[in-house]
Image (cartoon, rainbow, N blue to C red):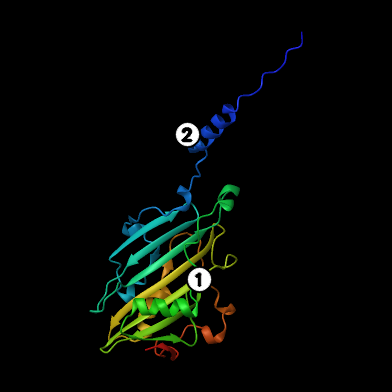
Protein backbone atom coordinates (compact mmCIF):
# COMPACT_ATOMS: atom_id res chain seq x y z
CA UNK A 1 0.00 0.00 0.00
CA UNK A 2 1.34 3.42 -0.99
CA UNK A 3 2.18 5.61 1.98
CA UNK A 4 0.64 9.09 1.91
CA UNK A 5 2.91 11.82 3.44
CA UNK A 6 1.45 13.61 6.40
CA UNK A 7 0.70 17.30 6.08
CA UNK A 8 3.11 19.65 7.89
CA UNK A 9 1.53 21.38 10.80
CA UNK A 10 1.31 25.19 10.46
CA UNK A 11 3.06 25.45 13.81
CA UNK A 12 6.36 24.03 12.45
CA UNK A 13 7.32 26.99 10.19
CA UNK A 14 6.41 29.40 12.95
CA UNK A 15 8.66 27.50 15.40
CA UNK A 16 11.59 27.55 12.96
CA UNK A 17 11.18 31.27 12.36
CA UNK A 18 11.13 31.92 16.09
CA UNK A 19 14.36 29.98 16.56
CA UNK A 20 16.12 31.89 13.77
CA UNK A 21 14.99 35.28 15.03
CA UNK A 22 15.39 34.49 18.67
CA UNK A 23 17.92 32.33 20.46
CA UNK A 24 20.00 31.49 17.35
CA UNK A 25 20.91 35.09 16.43
CA UNK A 26 24.15 34.97 18.43
CA UNK A 27 25.49 32.38 15.99
CA UNK A 28 25.51 34.99 13.21
CA UNK A 29 26.42 38.16 15.12
CA UNK A 30 28.83 40.33 13.14
CA UNK A 31 32.27 40.64 14.67
CA UNK A 32 33.14 44.36 14.67
CA UNK A 33 35.98 44.20 17.20
CA UNK A 34 38.54 44.69 14.44
CA UNK A 35 36.88 47.95 13.36
CA UNK A 36 36.72 49.62 16.76
CA UNK A 37 39.66 51.49 18.33
CA UNK A 38 41.34 49.94 21.32
CA UNK A 39 41.93 51.86 24.53
CA UNK A 40 44.90 54.22 24.66
CA UNK A 41 48.05 52.59 26.05
CA UNK A 42 51.01 54.51 27.44
CA UNK A 43 54.29 54.08 25.58
CA UNK A 44 57.78 53.79 26.98
CA UNK A 45 60.36 56.19 25.56
CA UNK A 46 62.05 53.46 23.50
CA UNK A 47 58.73 52.80 21.72
CA UNK A 48 58.08 56.38 20.60
CA UNK A 49 57.18 56.60 16.88
CA UNK A 50 59.68 59.39 16.16
CA UNK A 51 63.03 60.73 17.30
CA UNK A 52 63.13 64.51 17.66
CA UNK A 53 66.37 66.39 16.89
CA UNK A 54 68.41 66.63 20.09
CA UNK A 55 69.75 70.10 19.37
CA UNK A 56 66.26 71.59 19.63
CA UNK A 57 65.90 70.55 23.26
CA UNK A 58 62.29 69.32 23.02
CA UNK A 59 61.86 66.21 25.15
CA UNK A 60 58.42 64.55 24.96
CA UNK A 61 56.51 64.49 28.24
CA UNK A 62 54.54 61.33 27.47
CA UNK A 63 53.14 59.27 24.60
CA UNK A 64 50.27 56.87 24.03
CA UNK A 65 49.00 54.64 21.24
CA UNK A 66 45.93 52.72 20.10
CA UNK A 67 44.99 50.50 17.14
CA UNK A 68 42.00 49.89 14.89
CA UNK A 69 42.31 46.30 13.76
CA UNK A 70 45.54 45.59 11.91
CA UNK A 71 45.15 48.55 9.54
CA UNK A 72 45.41 51.75 11.59
CA UNK A 73 47.63 52.70 14.50
CA UNK A 74 47.64 56.15 16.11
CA UNK A 75 50.24 57.79 18.33
CA UNK A 76 49.89 60.93 20.45
CA UNK A 77 53.04 62.50 21.86
CA UNK A 78 52.67 65.25 24.48
CA UNK A 79 55.33 67.94 24.21
CA UNK A 80 56.39 70.56 26.80
CA UNK A 81 54.53 73.89 26.72
CA UNK A 82 56.76 76.85 27.65
CA UNK A 83 53.83 79.29 27.41
CA UNK A 84 50.78 80.05 29.56
CA UNK A 85 48.43 79.41 26.65
CA UNK A 86 45.71 76.83 26.98
CA UNK A 87 46.06 73.66 24.96
CA UNK A 88 48.54 70.87 24.59
CA UNK A 89 51.69 70.94 22.50
CA UNK A 90 51.75 67.62 20.70
CA UNK A 91 52.77 65.50 17.75
CA UNK A 92 50.17 63.18 16.21
CA UNK A 93 51.30 60.23 14.09
CA UNK A 94 48.65 58.12 12.33
CA UNK A 95 49.80 55.06 10.39
CA UNK A 96 47.78 53.15 7.79
CA UNK A 97 49.16 49.70 7.05
CA UNK A 98 48.61 47.66 3.92
CA UNK A 99 46.15 44.76 4.48
CA UNK A 100 47.89 41.42 4.75
CA UNK A 101 44.94 39.28 3.66
CA UNK A 102 41.81 39.39 1.51
CA UNK A 103 39.66 39.44 4.65
CA UNK A 104 41.45 42.52 6.01
CA UNK A 105 41.08 44.23 2.65
CA UNK A 106 37.33 43.55 2.49
CA UNK A 107 36.60 44.37 6.13
CA UNK A 108 38.63 47.48 6.85
CA UNK A 109 37.77 49.83 9.72
CA UNK A 110 36.75 53.46 9.04
CA UNK A 111 39.65 55.73 8.11
CA UNK A 112 41.58 57.08 11.09
CA UNK A 113 42.28 60.32 9.21
CA UNK A 114 40.63 62.10 6.26
CA UNK A 115 42.14 62.63 2.82
CA UNK A 116 42.73 65.46 2.13
CA UNK A 117 43.79 66.13 5.69
CA UNK A 118 42.11 69.54 5.74
CA UNK A 119 39.70 71.51 3.63
CA UNK A 120 39.17 75.28 3.96
CA UNK A 121 36.20 74.64 6.26
CA UNK A 122 37.77 71.99 8.48
CA UNK A 123 41.04 73.93 8.75
CA UNK A 124 39.31 77.07 9.97
CA UNK A 125 37.37 75.04 12.52
CA UNK A 126 40.58 73.32 13.69
CA UNK A 127 42.42 76.63 14.08
CA UNK A 128 39.56 78.10 16.10
CA UNK A 129 39.63 75.07 18.38
CA UNK A 130 43.41 74.96 18.76
CA UNK A 131 44.04 78.70 19.14
CA UNK A 132 40.98 80.51 20.49
CA UNK A 133 41.29 84.29 20.81
CA UNK A 134 44.41 84.29 18.60
CA UNK A 135 44.91 85.61 15.08
CA UNK A 136 45.66 82.73 12.72
CA UNK A 137 47.24 82.79 9.28
CA UNK A 138 47.67 80.10 6.67
CA UNK A 139 51.06 80.06 4.95
CA UNK A 140 50.96 80.98 1.27
CA UNK A 141 53.60 78.40 0.32
CA UNK A 142 54.38 74.98 1.77
CA UNK A 143 57.69 74.10 3.35
CA UNK A 144 59.86 71.04 3.08
CA UNK A 145 60.97 68.67 5.81
CA UNK A 146 62.87 65.41 5.92
CA UNK A 147 59.99 63.48 4.36
CA UNK A 148 58.78 66.01 1.81
CA UNK A 149 56.39 68.92 1.53
CA UNK A 150 54.09 69.98 4.35
CA UNK A 151 51.64 72.82 5.05
CA UNK A 152 51.31 74.95 8.14
CA UNK A 153 49.48 77.83 9.80
CA UNK A 154 50.69 80.41 12.34
CA UNK A 155 48.80 81.80 15.35
CA UNK A 156 49.75 84.94 17.27
CA UNK A 157 48.28 86.31 20.47
CA UNK A 158 48.39 89.68 22.22
CA UNK A 159 51.64 88.82 24.01
CA UNK A 160 54.87 87.34 22.73
CA UNK A 161 53.54 83.80 22.32
CA UNK A 162 53.50 82.27 18.83
CA UNK A 163 52.04 78.95 17.77
CA UNK A 164 52.23 76.78 14.66
CA UNK A 165 50.06 73.96 13.34
CA UNK A 166 51.78 71.86 10.67
CA UNK A 167 50.45 68.79 8.88
CA UNK A 168 51.81 66.34 6.34
CA UNK A 169 50.62 63.24 4.51
CA UNK A 170 53.25 60.70 3.49
CA UNK A 171 52.03 58.35 0.77
CA UNK A 172 55.05 57.93 -1.50
CA UNK A 173 55.52 54.15 -1.40
CA UNK A 174 58.14 54.16 -4.14
CA UNK A 175 60.73 56.39 -2.48
CA UNK A 176 59.76 57.02 1.17
CA UNK A 177 57.46 54.40 2.70
CA UNK A 178 58.06 50.65 2.91
CA UNK A 179 55.71 48.18 1.25
CA UNK A 180 53.97 47.42 4.56
CA UNK A 181 52.75 51.02 5.07
CA UNK A 182 50.17 52.72 2.87
CA UNK A 183 50.24 56.21 4.41
CA UNK A 184 51.38 58.21 7.45
CA UNK A 185 49.74 61.37 8.69
CA UNK A 186 51.78 63.81 10.79
CA UNK A 187 50.43 66.80 12.72
CA UNK A 188 52.59 69.15 14.79
CA UNK A 189 51.05 71.64 17.20
CA UNK A 190 53.55 73.77 19.11
CA UNK A 191 53.50 77.09 20.94
CA UNK A 192 56.60 79.01 22.06
CA UNK A 193 57.37 82.18 23.93
CA UNK A 194 59.11 84.90 21.94
CA UNK A 195 59.96 82.49 19.12
CA UNK A 196 59.70 82.90 15.38
CA UNK A 197 57.47 80.41 13.51
CA UNK A 198 60.50 78.97 11.75
CA UNK A 199 62.11 77.97 15.05
CA UNK A 200 58.90 76.22 16.09
CA UNK A 201 58.77 74.33 12.79
CA UNK A 202 62.38 73.13 12.78
CA UNK A 203 61.88 70.09 15.08
CA UNK A 204 58.97 68.95 12.89
CA UNK A 205 61.04 69.32 9.72
CA UNK A 206 63.95 67.31 11.09
CA UNK A 207 62.30 64.53 13.10
CA UNK A 208 63.00 60.90 12.19
CA UNK A 209 60.19 58.36 11.95
CA UNK A 210 60.79 55.03 13.72
CA UNK A 211 57.44 53.26 13.22
CA UNK A 212 59.24 51.17 10.58
CA UNK A 213 62.98 50.64 10.07
CA UNK A 214 62.99 51.38 6.33
CA UNK A 215 61.30 54.79 6.01
CA UNK A 216 63.54 56.93 3.81
CA UNK A 217 63.90 60.72 3.48
CA UNK A 218 62.32 62.27 0.42
CA UNK A 219 64.59 63.16 -2.47
CA UNK A 220 65.16 66.94 -2.78
CA UNK A 221 65.37 66.76 -6.57
CA UNK A 222 61.66 66.01 -6.97
CA UNK A 223 60.47 69.00 -4.91
CA UNK A 224 59.59 72.33 -6.57
CA UNK A 225 61.98 75.17 -5.75
CA UNK A 226 59.18 77.17 -4.11
CA UNK A 227 58.73 74.46 -1.47
CA UNK A 228 62.36 73.75 -0.61
CA UNK A 229 63.56 74.12 2.93
CA UNK A 230 64.35 77.74 3.81
CA UNK A 231 67.76 78.40 5.44
CA UNK A 232 67.87 79.12 9.17
CA UNK A 233 68.59 82.81 8.76
CA UNK A 234 65.66 83.39 6.36
CA UNK A 235 62.16 83.92 7.82
CA UNK A 236 59.32 81.73 6.52
CA UNK A 237 57.12 82.93 3.70
CA UNK A 238 54.55 85.51 4.70
CA UNK A 239 51.29 83.79 5.67
CA UNK A 240 47.91 84.80 4.36
CA UNK A 241 45.21 85.64 6.86
CA UNK A 242 42.49 83.10 7.59
CA UNK A 243 40.53 84.88 10.33
CA UNK A 244 40.76 87.30 13.22
Name above or below for residue 100 compared with residue 52.
above
The residue nearer to you, when weighing 86 against 215, is 86
The residue beneath circle 1 is: 169
The residue nearer to you, when weighing 48 against 221, is 48
Mark 2 against mark 1, which lies toward the viewer?
Answer: 2
Residue 243: % across, % down:
40, 87
Instruction: Determine whether, in the image, residue 187 is placed left or right of residue 59.
Output: right
Are the two marked residues, 2 and 1, in contact with CB atoms closer than 8 angstroms? no
Residue 231 visible in the snapshot: no
Name of the residue lying farthest toward the left: 84
Quadrant that contains the N terminus = top right
Give neighbour class at mark 1: few <14, some 14-19, many 20+ (Cα, 10 Å).
Answer: some
Quadrant that contains the C terminus = bottom left
Tell which circle, 2 or 1, labels the residue nearer the N-terminal end: 2
- In the image, which disc is placed on residue 134? none
Name above or below for residue 83 compared with residue 186.
below
Name of the residue lying farthest toward the right: 1
Label 1: element kind: strand
Name above or below for residue 30 compared with residue 7.
below
Label 2: element kind: loop
Give neighbour class at mark 2: few <14, some 14-19, many 20+ (Cα, 10 Å).
Answer: few
Residue 47: % across, % down:
36, 57
- In the image, which disc is placed on residue 23? 2
Name the residue: 49% across, 72% down. Answer: 117
Residue 8: % across, % down:
64, 24
Residue 76: quadrant of the picture: bottom left
Residue 81: quadrant of the picture: bottom left
Name the residue: 53% across, 69% down. Answer: 115
Amino acid sequence: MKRVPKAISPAVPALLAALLLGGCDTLYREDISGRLPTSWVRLDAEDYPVVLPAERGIVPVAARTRRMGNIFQSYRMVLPNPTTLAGENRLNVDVEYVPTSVFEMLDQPPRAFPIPLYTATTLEAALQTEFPEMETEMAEAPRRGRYGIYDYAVARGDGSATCVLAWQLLDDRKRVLPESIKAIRLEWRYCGQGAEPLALLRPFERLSLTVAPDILPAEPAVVPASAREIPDETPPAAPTRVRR
